[in-house]
Image (cartoon, grey):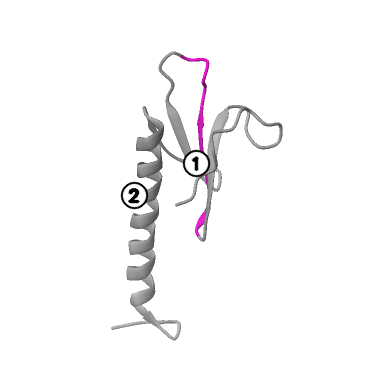
Amino acid sequence: MEWTEPKSPTEGESYYDHVKCETPLGGIIIEWKSWKSDPDYGIEIDGKYIDTCYALENAKLRARLYLTNMQEELYQYLNTYTNGRKRE
C-alpha cells in the first residue's frame, strides 16, 4: 500500500495530522493529534471509523488487515452466486 507522507492539518482534507492511501475499495485516512505527547491514530475507510491504534505503523497494518478481511468476505460472497443466482 502506498501512503502519503505525513501531512499537517489541511482545510478540506483533515483537521489533524494525517496520512492517506487510495485503494480500489476506498480511500483510507489515518489521523492523529500531533500536539499530544502520546497520540492515538484513528483509522477511517471512506468515512467509516475502523479502529484506533497507538502507533502509526500499527494503524497502517490494521488498515491492511481490514482490507484483507473485506477482500476475503467479498470473494466468499461473490463465490456463492453465479449469474445473479445463489448456488445451491
Q: Quadrant of the C terminus?
A: bottom left
Q: At 52% across and 32% down in the image, what residue appears?
A: 31
Mark 2 vs mark 1: in front = 2
Graded by Cα atoms within 10 Å as few (under 14), some (14 to 19) or many (20 or more), the crowding at tag 1 reads: some
Q: At 38% across and 62% down in the image, what residue appears?
A: 71
Q: Going by the image, does 48 lie left or right of 72? A: right
Q: Toward which corner of the image does residue 72 lie, by quadrant?
A: bottom left
Is disc 2 placed on a helix, strand or loop?
Answer: helix
Q: CA distance from mark 2 to mark 1?
A: 13 Å
Amino acid under disc 2:
Leu
Q: On the image, numbered disc 1 is attached to which residue?
A: 44
Q: Position of residue 49 (x, y in %)?
A: 47, 39
Q: Toward which corner of the image does residue 86 lie, by quadrant?
A: bottom left
Nearer to me, 48 or 32: 32
Q: On the image, numbered disc 2 is attached to which residue?
A: 65
Q: Going by the image, does 14 lie left or right of 53? A: right
First to last magenta residue range: 25-36
Q: Position of residue 61 (x, y in %)?
A: 35, 43
| Contact between labelled residues 1 and 2, with CB atoms less than 8 Å apart | no
**What residue occupies the far right of the structure in this picture?**
11
- The mark found on residue 79 in the picture is none
